[in-house]
Amino acid sequence: MYSGSQSGGIDREKIVSLLVADDHELLRDAISEILKREGGFSVEVTGSREGVLKQIEEKGGFDVILLDLQMPGMSGLDSLREVATSNADGAVALFTGELTRDVVMSAFRAGAKGYIPKTLPLRALPIALRLIASGVSYVPAWLANGGGATQGDGPSFDLLPEELQILEAVSDGRTNKEIAFTMDVTEGSIKMKMRTICMKLGAKNRTHAVVIARQHMMLR
């Protein structure tokens, strides 16, 4: 789930520059491989606070930095502030284990623009990163909808098969008009159904609804 001001949706044509800052090499490699297959990302990696600052200096900053607060050299929110200031033209997203709402909110006040827990399904990672790169503040759905420290506390949703079909089509990039033609209904009917879907998911718009559905593994 995301919160914050809209920025005209996700620009899938833009190459997102990403720095994965985590001292677990296997995890860094997995993320790099996934984003390589996804396309639209240029990825650098590092495993320490010093490495982050050096990469920012050498590259001139990144659209998004995935920052593990437990890396060598890190000192909690002070290091987050330092990295956010150094990467002033881009965004910094926490990349760590599950945190309480209070800790996440403190991190946002310290300059974070997103929180991506390491329990987030990897297939949801590209869209989360694009949202953050577009200027949208991102937190997982279970937290934004009032969850506590674990994803298991998140909300449950009651979408009808037809509503899931519409969300699948939206996730494929199809317009309401195209969906209406495929389902042999009016475009107005699809708009009404999308309003219902958004209400059930607590979503602000169709893109937001897809993000929530992906995080809860509702879509293929």
Image: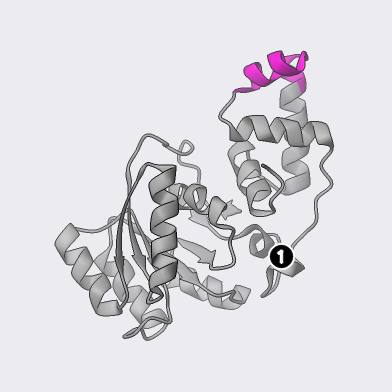
Q: Give residue 144's position: percent from left, percent from top.
A: 64, 61
At x 24%, y 78%, the residue is 50
Instruction: Indicate the position of residue 205 as horizontal and vertical percent values.
Output: 63, 38
**Identity of the amino acid at label 1?**
Gly
Q: Nearer the viewer, residue 119 or 144?
A: 119
Residue 84 falls left or right of residue 163: left
Asked whether 201 falls inside the magenta stretch, the response is no
On screen, residue 155 versus residue 211, left or right, reads right
Residue 140: image location, x then y, percent: 60, 60
Tell whether 199 sits left or right of 114: right
Please tell me which residue is depicted at 68% across the width and 43% down the height of the picture. Answer: 219
Residue located 77% across and 13% down the image = 184
Characterize the local packing of mark 1: few (<14), some (14-19) or many (20 or more) Cα atoms within 10 angstroms: few
Q: Quadrant of the C terminus?
A: top right
Which residue is the site of mark 1? 146
Residue most toward the left?
58
Q: Is residue 133 visible?
A: no
Task: Kindly identify the residue that appears in the image at 37 percent across and 75 percent down.
Answer: 80
* Region of the chain picked out in magenta, as a range: 175-189
In the rendered view, tell whether residue 30 sits above or below residue 67.
above
**Vertical order, 174 against 200 (above or below):** above
The image quadrant that residue 57 belongs to is: bottom left
- Local SS, label 1: loop
The image shows residue 109 at horizontal and vertical percentages of 46, 70
Q: Main secondary structure of the magenta part?
A: helix
